[in-house]
Image: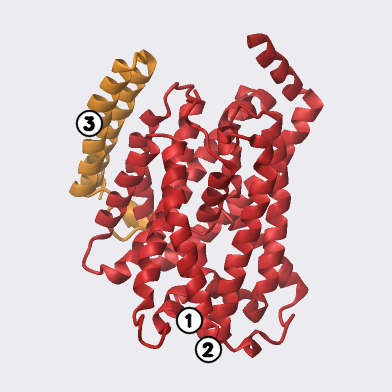
Chain colours: A red, B orange
Amino acid sequence: MLKNSDRITALQMFIILVSTFNAIEVIVVPRVLALTVGQDGWLVLIGGHFLSAIAVFFIVKLGMLYPHETFAEYAPKILGRFLGIPIVAVAAIFWVLICARILRQFADFIQLILPQTPIEVIILTVLLVAGYIARHGIEPIARTIEILFPVFISILGLLVLGSLIEVDLMRLLPILDASPKILALESIKTSFGLEGQEILLMLLPFMAIPEKAYSTVYGALICNLVIRWALFVAVIGFFGVELTKTLVWPVEELSRSLTIGGTFIGRFDSFLISLWVTVAFTSILVFLFLASLTVSRIMKFREQSITVLPLIPLIFIAALLPDSIVTTEEWSDYLSNVWGVFIFTIPPLLLLISYIRGTHKKNSRERLKER
Amino acid sequence: MNFMEQIGLEQPLFNISRMLIFVVIGLATFYFDSRLMERKGLKRESFWSKVFGALLVLIGIGGWIAIKIFG
């Protein structure tokens, strides 16, 4: 059941998308790219975002055929309940796991500044606050993110601008050092790792003007590309490829190494960490909401909030499964790849089947009759 | 090699504090959510809240006991 107040503007959707893309990746992406393609990472970012744009096209196209329904409602209509429900259930499981993964990486990062605090305490406090907001629907989530987003963007902007003086652009040369095959494979991996592109499967019907979905999502992809591109250039230009490969959180290291305005801001990293926490939190919030919304739609509940609390212990335990940062990254890569394949295959398939069976036409006729 | 080592975990997944989280959230779902839904006139949702709550309590206690018994 969609409440009348549960509507978000195109700008709010844009902010949700950019925040979700940048959960954890934003602070690790220079290292991941440096390890695989070295200084050619900026090319991979462009390729990865281009591929994501293709995947998103199918997601939005599919959503526009069923503008008043979520993925959990139209997938069973297109494929039949026997096939549709398991696919939606898989999506719900992935959202739970992605939420747990972000939460774990978030907790690992926070332990840098709170080394004495048990990881369980960090995870649980974040989950409970996220759960409280997620119970109230998409609008409070959008408003929360709307408040936090501009501050984070300005801090990132300040970080990039502050590093410009010490950035050596020669460190980005030579171009095309990695082979085209590796560049292509890494581009695919980057697009798989852009978790957040799929949230329109569930959130499109919440948009006040769904027709703006294309411009919103492409705007968000471009904004995300600019953010990652700028950070990659800043980090590689500052540390060089070899040093970046050894840094666990390169963007945090960059902020630690900078002194902006002479010694006026000596510990810039404290600003970055405190504000990055808000972005990671918003991603956790969005994925928790998506998982609870999907479960509630599968079970045909008229109220989404009742599935939030039961999901919290499951996410909590899933977040505690990896025993170290390395295991978390390995599992995270695996999760991204499997989920990426899902996102790149299922929406185009559903779109094709919907056109062949004419499900969307029958659906709109039924909706007209209901009115 | 016990079950935890087999699935690649060096520490038990369910200890007393983690079990308590399941139990406390299960009880909150069982009592608060189900009553809230009933007050809103959503009988089916209220029933399912009770089911979810009871399941969480069972998973918490059951998981902890299973780890105690099977290591």
Mark 1 → mark 2, Cα distance in angstroms? 20 Å
Is residue A107 found left or right of A232 in the rendered image?
left
Above/below status of A216 relative to A298? below
Residue at image location 43% in from the left, 29% down from the top = A304
Position in image of residue A306 (x %, y %) = 36, 29
Above/below status of A104 relative to A200? below
Helix, strand or loop at disc 2? loop
Is residue A125 found left or right of A60 in the rendered image?
left
**Residue type highlighted by circle 1:** Thr
- Name the chain letter of the residue that bears numbered label 3: B
Mark 1 → mark 3, Cα distance in angstroms? 46 Å
- Name the chain letter of the residue that bears numbered label 1: A
- Residue at numbered disc 3: B27
In the rendering, which numbered label is found on residue A246? 1
Q: Quadrant of residue B43?
A: top left
Helix, strand or loop at disc 1? loop
Q: Residues within 10 Å of mark 2 (few under 14, many from 20)?
A: few
- Foreground mark, 3 or 2? 2
Looking at the rendered structure, whether the residues under marks 3 and 2 are on a common chain is answered as no
* CB atoms of marks 1 and 3 within 8 Å: no
